[in-house]
Image (tube, rainbow, N blue to C red):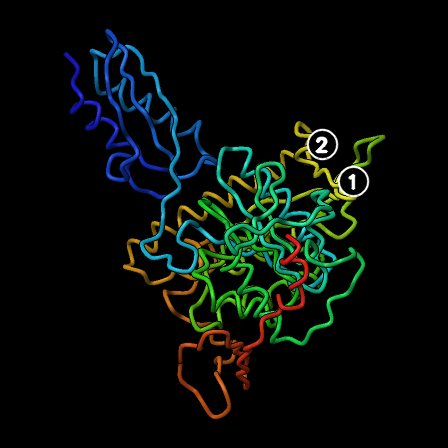
Amino acid sequence: MATVEQVLAALSHVQDPELHRDLVSLGMIRDIRFEGTIAHFEVVLTTPACPLKSRIEEDCRKAVLDRMPDVTDIAITWGAQVPKPRQQEVLPGVRHVVAIGSGKGGVGKSTVTVNVAIALAATGARVGLIDADIYGPTVPLLLGISEKPLVQDGKIVPIERHGVKTMSMGFLLPNADDPVVWRGPMLAGVLQQFIRDVAWGELDYLLVDLPPGTGDVPLSLAQQLPLTGVAVVVTPQIVAQQIGLKTLRMFEMVPTPVPVLGIIENMSHFVCPSCQHETAIFDHGGGREVAVRQGVAFLGGIPLDAGIRQSGDQGLPIVVSAPDSAQARAFHDIARHLAGQVSIRHFALEETGGLRLTHAPEVPGHRPLAVGQVRSDTAPHVHGPGCSHEHEPSPGEVTVQGEATPEKRSPFKAFGQFLKRS
């Protein structure tokens, strides 16, 4: 007669394909029971966006049926629980914060971020999105949001669209075309308030759409939040690759190096709608080349398509307006791979006792960085004039190479009338 212990013993031979640990030791097997000769159990995935669910099911079936002659079939119930880091004091309800960056503007980073966020939410994950491009907020347009957020109990309530809670500077401007004319230190202040003064609640993933480049906002974000990692959006041509690498290396150089979750190649190729012929307008495969060269994951490619642009202009992203299209499937694939990398980073961090791994597992032909190692071809990060050692920034401090500027003003004072009206 089959027993619960036998099922656990059989499933201990099944490894999570990404984490490379067995399902039993990961605590992913629950509620084992029998109905005749059928074994029922629940597999609790580390993300609802698991990209390898079918493979796990196949491996479970083979492991049980090959080792338990009294069992004729299995019935799996699927669950998901995004693992929570040991310490998260800044945003206690948020399990993972993921930054999406690019070295330059015009690569479609915001479009990618919005579609990936919605794709994650479609799997059942609880998702938030910070539009950290203070000078050029585009998320309100991409999501079709024109209303202002409410304020409850002294905190701004993020606006929700398609299952994604969102906060953007664009929500706070009197008019959509009004410019934000601020010096760098004020950007750090408003970012801090987007983090601390917004009622984010419980989230599995909080995506941060960074402004292009390697300036104040990415530096401040790396200081203010325990980032799970960063994904970098590039287009295939060489010039975009080179600039995208600057973002990747910037996150290696901050006081606490941020793991790179992978590379996303946007505008990967153009498919003619009439003849289906593919044309590499901006070259092709550059994103994958960067990923292999740097020893990080390649999360996927997105075609250059008018439908993606049109849906964004209409405030209805392609994953919503055409969910069964090839373009939408590309975003869903990237979302699943990104979620998988987050799980890998989480368990790697647990195994190293809190030491951050800055790169993905080894890629053939490339030796990735060791824990805490900085590339020899990058300059050391210096904090302040004449200071060559690491130090913790004080609250509100923006630290850049050669300069440390404390910012004590609250940028939201400019929106006092709005908050009062709300």
Q: Residues within 10 Å of mark 1 (few under 14, many from 20)?
A: few
Please tell me whether residue 136 is drawn above or below residue 71 in the rendered image.
below
Judge by depth and name the residue closer to the eye, 145 or 209.
Answer: 145
Tag 2 or tag 1, which sits nearer the N-term? 1
Looking at this rendering, what residue extends furthest in the bottom direction? 386
Q: Nearer the viewer, residue 112 or 168?
A: 168
**Spatial CA span between label 1 and label 2:** 10 Å
- Image point (78%, 55%), residue name: 176
Disc 2: CA contacts within 10 A as few (<14), some (14-19) or many (>=20): some
Give SS at disc 1: loop
Locate residue 304: give its quadrant: top right
Q: Which sits in the foreground, 11 or 99? A: 99
Residue closer to the observer: 377 or 193? 193
**Quick one: quadrant of the N terminus?**
top left
Residue 422 in the image: state x and y as whole percent: 64, 52
Q: Which residue is mark 2?
A: 321
Residue 292 lies, in percent from the top left, at 53, 55
Q: Which residue is mark 1?
A: 314
Question: Does the CB distance between marks 1 and 2 fall below 8 Å?
Answer: yes
